[in-house]
Image (cartoon, helix red, strand yellow):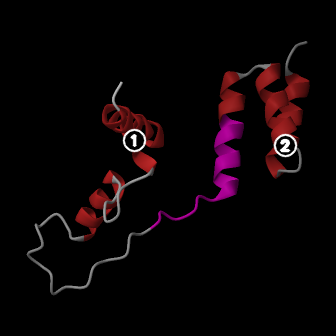
Amino acid sequence: MKLGSFSAGLVGVLAVVAGPDHLSIGEQPVMVVKANADENGKDGGKDRGKAGRAPSMPMARDPSAAVAEEYEAARRTGTREALELFIARHGDAPLAEQARAELKRLPR
C-alpha cells in the first residue's frame, strides 16, 4: 500500500467522522445560511432601506384559563380518574373544590 493512498483514505475517514459540525474555515452551517436569508426578507432584498422588524413572541397564556380548560375537560369526561388527576395537578386552584364536590357526587 502506498503512503499517498493511505493518507488520502485517512483524510476521508476523518472528514466523515468529523461530520458537519466541523466545517472548513469560512463555511457556515445550512441553518445559519437559511437564517441569514430570512433576515434579508422574502422580497429578495428589495426593501434594504427599511429597518427589519424584530420577531415577536406570542403573549404568554393565562395560567388560570389553562386550569379552567383542564377542569372542563375533566368534568366532561365525568370519570373519577379524570377528576382525581385534576385535583392532583391543581389541588390549590379554586376549581379544585368544585372538582372535589363533583367527585363526591359520582358513584363509586
Q: Position of residue 108 (x, y in %)?
A: 91, 12
71 sits to left or right of 47: right
Q: Which residues are magenta?
A: 57-72
Q: Secondary structure at mark 1?
A: helix
- Expressed as whole percent of the image width and height from the top left, the position of residue 59 reads 52, 65
Task: Kindly report the distance in space between the C-alpha atoms of the residues bearing marks 1 and 2.
Answer: 59 Å
Residue under pointer 2: 96
1 or 2: mark nearer the eye: 1
Q: Is residue 25 magenta?
A: no
The amino acid beneath tag 2 is: Ala
In the image, taking residue 31 as reference, residue 67 lies left or right, namely: right
Camera-side residue of 12 and 79: 12
Residue drawn 28% across the image and 59% down it? 33
Q: Please name the residue that numbered disc 1 is placed on.
A: 15
Q: Residue furthest top?
A: 108
Quick one: label 1, few (<14), some, or many (20+) residues within 10 Å? few
Q: Is residue 62 magenta?
A: yes
Task: Identify the main secondary structure in magenta.
Answer: helix
Q: Nearer the viewer, residue 85 or 15?
A: 15
Of labels 1 and 2, earlier in sequence is 1
Q: Residue at x 32, y 37 (%)?
A: 4
- Which image quarter: residue 61? bottom right
Q: Is residue 75 above or below residue 67?
A: above
Q: Is residue 43 left or right of residue 102?
A: left
